[in-house]
Image (cartoon, rainbow, N blue to C red):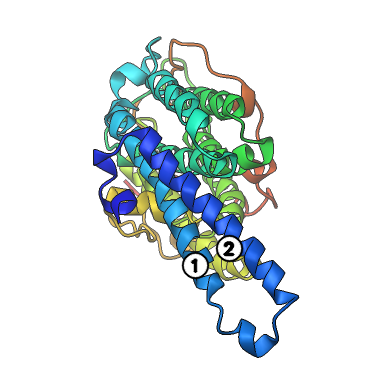
Amino acid sequence: GVLRDGWGTLELSHIAAQTNNCTRMMDGCSQLLEDLEGKLEPERLENVELQLLIDGFTAVSRFGTTAVCNVIFQDIGPLFQKLFTQKWLDGDKERVVDSIVATIKDYAEEVQEYLHETYYRKMLVEVMERVVVSYGAQLLRQTSAHNVDASGGIRADAASLEALFTICGLPNRMLALRLKPVLLLASLSGVPLTVDAPEKEGKAGTPDLEKFAAEVCQWLEGALAAFPDLCTDVIYRVLKQRSDIDGRARNAVLVRCNEVHAELLAKVREKSSKGTWAFFTEVYKELGAQPGPHVPTGDGVLTSLATMVTKGGQMRIRGTGHRRQPSAEAGVGLGAGVSEAEKGVKRDRGANAVDIMYRLQM
């Protein structure tokens, strides 16, 4: 009813009051049902439809927490558009996430005074998940290539969110699970492209695309194990933002990523639990796009590794192959280390198979 569809007309205190009332009614019905189970015969107990009331009150309470989230997102929603702009990439001291954090903190302090503790925590979890999804969607929405390694800034933002929700009262186990996709995207964005020293002075060095592709495939293994709904279009979108990787290199890497993804997906889905957070599904829903593999076309696409030739030498990637760091200091906290999910397993997968370098005939 009103909590679901008319939340925009309600004060936070009113939303909290309705949520709390439903919570008390739910607890009362649960207690009554428990008492009756020991006093009534089973056939009579079947006629007492208390469970339907409990389910109804539970649903209304959940609408209440979502209504609070909607109010918060009315304020912070427009801020996500300022992420990953040139100003953000340059390490602007007035970071966007700081504004998001401050706004959520103000709302959380107010709501905590009104809302039942159980649903206050549920509200925090929902807010955090929506923030992380919107953050990931904004990252994947970018299309312009730049020469800034954004991984440090992403980790700094993750550390700010970690600090906020810790202060608000969420335990570490809840934080780690929900910040994991942000840190994985930071790792993908920061995969280094090594450039070998040039043979002659004044000549550009040769980028080690084989090593780069192997590390991206390694990242894919770990990320897919954590989030089975991950698609290779994510890799395409992130690599497209890097000015040190041109279209031909990106296509070559994506060919191998699609092979690894297809090979691992069935195994990963068998092992994944039903409660696994479908993070990337939610991200693509916000993007208004369908998640799926990115099938590259054009230069760099090879059907067989055996068909590659080395005549004419190797093409060189635009620029120096090095990306500058943002001017602001990179964050610490959760982003300071690399998790096992980021490291992946079987480091040699892709290294043996990905000989997709620029060895195409000019």
In three-dimensional space, the C-alpha distance between marks 1 and 2, rounded to whole angstroms, equals 7 Å
Find residue 108 and report its horizontal and vertical position in percent: 48, 28
Please report the residue visible at 55 percent of the width from the left and 71 percent of the height from the top.
51
The amino acid type found where label 1 is placed reads Leu
- Please name whichever residue, 98 or 2, is drawn nearer the observer in this view of the structure: 2
Q: Quadrant of residue 84?
A: top left
Give the vertical position of 185 relative to 336 (above or below): below
Question: In the figure, 238 relative to 279: above or below?
Answer: above
The answer to whether the residues at label 1 and label 2 have Cβ atoms under 8 Å apart is: yes
Establish if 358 lies above or below 168.
below
Q: Is residue 79 visible?
A: yes
State the mark number for residue 53: 1
| Residue at the bottom extreme of this rendering | 43
From where the camera sits, is residue 211 visible?
no
Horizontally, is 284 left or right of 164 in the view? left
Please give the residue where the numbered disc 2 appears in the rendered image.
29
